[in-house]
Image (cartoon, rainbow, N blue to C red):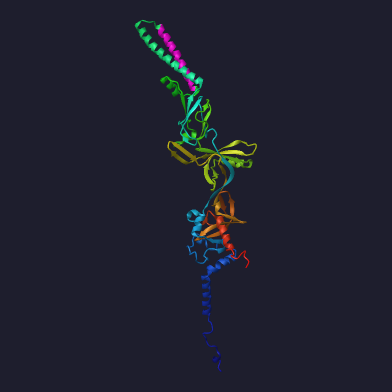
Amino acid sequence: MSQASLKPRFSWATPGPWFYVALVCNVFLIIAILQNFWLPHVRGWLGMENGPAAGTEEKHNKKEPAKDAHAGHDHAGHDEGNSIELSLQARRNLGIEGKDGVVKIELKPFTRTLSLPGIVVERPGRSIVQATAPLTGIVTKIYPTQGEAVVPGQKLFDIRLTHEELVQSQADLLKTAEELDVIAREIARIEQLTKDGALARKQLLERQYEQQKQEAALRSQSQSLLLHGLTQGQVDEIVKKRTLLQFLTVEAPGPTDRMAAADEPRFFQVQNLKVAQGQHVTAGDALAVLVDHSELFIEGNAFERDIAEINRASAANQPLTALMEIEGKQPQAVKDLQLLYVDSQVDPESRALHFYVTLPNQEEQNKQDGERRYISWRYRPGQRTQLLVPVETWKDRIVLPVDAIVEEGAETYVFTPNGDHFDRRAVHVEYKDQTSVVIANDGVLFPGDTVVKVAAKQLQLALKNKASGPADPHAGHNH
């Protein structure tokens, strides 16, 4: 047999090099197609579930399209162990549906503050005005009702005068006015006779001197009535009509400095009526307490260790923020408040130093009921608050509402929307106060990302319930 006959012949049963190339390509193709199934598990094994995958920065802002609720639970771009799917109704119940439920990440300055307790108080000598009885008498009519709003100069009370000295002073004034009328007529008669030469000029001079004396007495008696509480108009009315003043109307006092500086009309509020109809009052008795709450103070309480920060904020004229406590709601932030002054003494009992902040008020209600008007204010004396005194400002920070995070042991999480899912991300908190939290800019969150700004605790609870699985229907039963 020749050597040529011993050479192996080509056979289709023997795989060639192109077969292996095709096989490798097919394997890689299958792996690429199934990456959505195996890639999340590999990332979980490698501890990459909380950080961003390499080369995915361009995908952060892309949202997954909404999928059928009955479709498979494996979605591209999130790990099922750190993601929760919510229905539209659930998102609406939590208040995280739409733009109002999320906040967009952006770098901005953050001011660290010192939180101090405070209480809303009235402005001493400005907020409270008393209407008092100018003269002794009996209250015959009360015009306003308690709680009603009145303008300066509005009628409040009618008083029937019973003071004997006042009655006598009016009678003396009236008698002097009548005598002046008699003297005036007599002077006119004597002047004519003097011109005709029937009477000496001496008699005319005597009458003129007497007239001057009575005019001086009239001025003195008028001043006495003014000191008793009558107005110049009331005194002139007595002289003009020649009748004694029997009744006196007490009006609302003039406007406070805050009311006078306002462009629109301002009102007093009748806080307390001190008298009843038919009650006898003496001069100086309080008839009603009127209040002007268009501006109030916040009395803050600081301790000795905080005095330096307060003085620094006062010297720099930095605005303060007040967190007003509202029952059943989140505290309301009132910004750009001015620190008015710091008390010069420390309270010996509480060892606290008081400082005062101006609080412009706002009308919440102003309604007309017939001829009566009633108003109510947003801020009221006695309301508790927290004053935020600025300490230092940090630049380029990720700042979120405090309700955007949830703490679980040593970890702190936020939730980012991803289609109908919400993915949990672990973040590092640099600072937290009552309203805001500063998140470290370490690559977990990027500017332009969106984060759920409320209901983070509810989302965390839903995620934990999902991980625990449904309850065993046979638990607790013996078969």
Q: Is residue 213 left or right of residue 456?
A: left
Asked if residue 459 shows in the view, the reply is: yes
Image quarter of the N terminus: bottom right
Residue found 57% across the figure and 65% down from its top:
43
Residue 472 location in percent, x, y? 59, 65
Image quarter of the C terminus: bottom right
Q: Is residue 206 magenta?
A: yes
Q: Is residue 420 magenta?
A: no
Looking at the image, the residue that sits furthest to the left is 196
Q: Quadrant of residue 445?
A: bottom right
Residue 167 location in percent, x, y? 48, 20
- Give the answer, above or below, for where 173 lies relative to 157: above
- Give the answer, above or below, for where 98 lies relative to 319: below
Residue 286 location in percent, x, y? 53, 29
Residue found 52% across the figure and 44% down from its top:
335
Asked if residue 263 shows in the view, the reply is: no
Of residues 340 and 120, the one nearer the viewer is 120
Point out the stretch of residues depicted in magenta: 202-226
Residue 424 location in percent, x, y? 56, 59
- Decide whether the magenta segment is chiefly helix, strand or loop: helix
Q: Is residue 8 left or right of residue 347?
A: left
Q: Is residue 112 left or right of residue 161?
A: right
